Amino acid sequence: MNKEECLRAQAAHNLPCFIHECPLHQTCLHWLTGQYYGSDFHVVTSVNPYYPNVNSLQCTLYQKDEIVTYAIGIKHIFDDIPYPIARIVKKRLIALFSRKRFYEYRNGTRPIPPKDQQHIARIFHEEGWDGEIRYDDWKEDYQW
């Protein structure tokens, strides 16, 4: 799927921004998806132009239009790890992400963004595991 098709598909699911004067609008996913809202939408919830820092270089809602690599599934992440380390790491991951999100990540129903991959690696390292962290699969997508 090319960039335009991807933006068109996400338009109805992403918060649009219609602030054309914003200095970041050319690379912001909110603004880019907003361009694909057509006349078939009668009412649209969008970015408030009066919200602090919106329409500035410090926009708190800015989402860069870059492709990132998501990990998919962690069903086998503990296979090669000693049980005492695996037990503690699992508890810490559940405490960090919540039980629901941990199992969504585990089962592959929610992709794991790069930021959370870094958290996972940090926890493994802090608990004494410096080996490979095995994810089930990978996918590239925008960070919606």
Image (cartoon, rainbow, N blue to C red):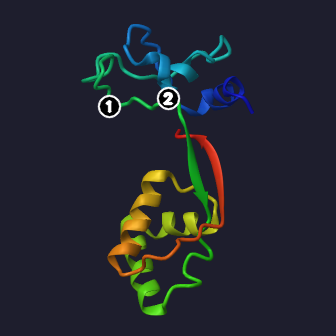
Q: Nearer the viewer, residue 47 or 86?
A: 86
Q: Is residue 60 visible?
A: yes
Q: Nearer the viewer, residue 17 or 72?
A: 72
14 left or right, relative to 127: right
| Residue depicted at x 62% and y 77% | 76
The picture quadrant where one finds residue 14 is top right
| On screen, residue 108 above or below 52 | below
Image disc number at residue 22: none
Q: Which residue is mark 1?
A: 60
- Furthest toward the right, the residue is 1
The picture quadrant where one finds residue 80 is bottom right
Identify the amino acid type marked 2.
Leu
Which x, y percent locates residue 133?
53, 71
Q: Nearer the viewer, mark 2 or mark 1?
A: 1
Q: Nearer the viewer, residue 31 or 120?
A: 120
- Tell me the quarter of the image containing the N terminus: top right
Q: Which residue is mark 2?
A: 15
Q: Marks 2 and 1: CB-CB under 8 Å?
A: no
| On screen, residue 99 above or below 111 | below
Which x, y percent locates residue 132?
53, 73
Could you say whether the residue bearing mark 2 is in a helix, strand or loop? loop
* Label 1 CA crowd tier, 10 Å (few <14, some 14–19, many 20+): few
- Furthest toward the top, the residue is 21
| Residue depicted at x 30% and y 18% | 56
Identify the amino acid type marked 1.
Thr
| Residue depicted at x 40% and y 29% | 62
85 left or right, relative to 112: left
